[in-house]
Amino acid sequence: MILNILFVCTGNICRSPMAEYYLKHLIETKNIAFLTTFSAGIHACAGLPASEHAITVMSELGIDLSQHQGKQLTSYMVEFANWIIVMEQRQKNIIGKMNKKVMLLSEFSEYDIGYDITDPYGGTIEMYRTSRDRIIDCVDGFVRRFPRENGFDLPPDFNPFED
């Protein structure tokens, strides 16, 4: 079984692409074959590239966002996704009316459960780094906990973060 994970933010040019591409990086480097991911925005302008600062802060980790193009959230995406992970409670409220399998990304944080991941759009490079680091904390927590908590038969010693 493969889980399709959809990350959603507002414009699909900052936070959700950072989460999508970071999870893709983990899928490839940690051989997590049971996950696939994509992203969209509630108010996206289709075809816009990732923001310049998002590209920069992800490239600092060796992750290339330069080919990303923004996508508007569609009902097909909502139906296709096994789980939808949002950046803000407001987004959870909106999508939750369409679909019950919606979670706030920070529910997987190791440190600050339940907060909104602030939209850095138009902010400084440091604001983008802060959002990126919070996203990484949460995505790492998702990968550690979610599969086992949702019935995947994984070895007891499964830890994708051990080399």
Image (spheres, grey):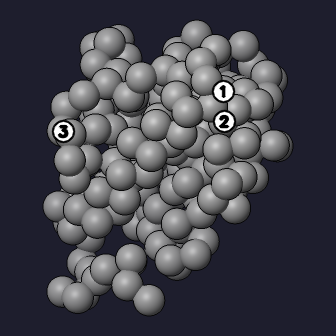
81 to the left or right of 13 = left
Asked if residue 148 is positioned above or below residue 98 in the image, the reply reads: below
Q: Are marks 3 and 2 in contact (CB under 8 Å)?
A: no
Q: Is residue 101 visible?
A: no
Q: Residue at x 25, y 28 (%)?
A: 115
Q: Residue at x 47, y 35 (%)?
A: 131
Q: Which mark is residue 39?
A: none
142 to the left or right of 114 = right
Residue tagged 2: 54
Q: Position of residue 132 (x, y in %)?
A: 50, 42
Residue tagged 1: 13
At label 1, counting other C-alpha atoms closer than 10 Å, the crowd grade (few under 14, some 14-19, many 20 or more) is many
Numbered disc 3: secondary structure: loop
Numbered disc 2: secondary structure: helix
Q: Is residue 123 visible?
A: yes
Query: Between 98 and 108, which is closer to the camera in this rendering?
Result: 108
Label whose residue precedes the other's in the sequence (3 or 1):
1
Q: State the separation of the CA atoms marked 3 and 2.
A: 23 Å
Q: Are marks 1 and 2 in contact (CB under 8 Å)?
A: yes
Q: State the separation of the CA atoms marked 1 and 2.
A: 8 Å
Q: Residue at x 47, y 73 (%)?
A: 32
Q: Which mark is residue 113?
A: 3
Q: Position of residue 101 (x, y in %)?
A: 28, 35
Quadrant showing the N terminus: bottom left
Q: Position of residue 118 (x, y in %)?
A: 42, 23
Q: Residue at x 66, y 36 (%)?
A: 54
**Of the residues shown, which amino acid type is indicated by label 2?**
Ala
**Of the residues shown, which amino acid type is indicated by label 1?**
Ile
Q: State the separation of the CA atoms marked 3 and 1.
A: 24 Å
Label whose residue precedes the other's in the sequence (3 or 2):
2
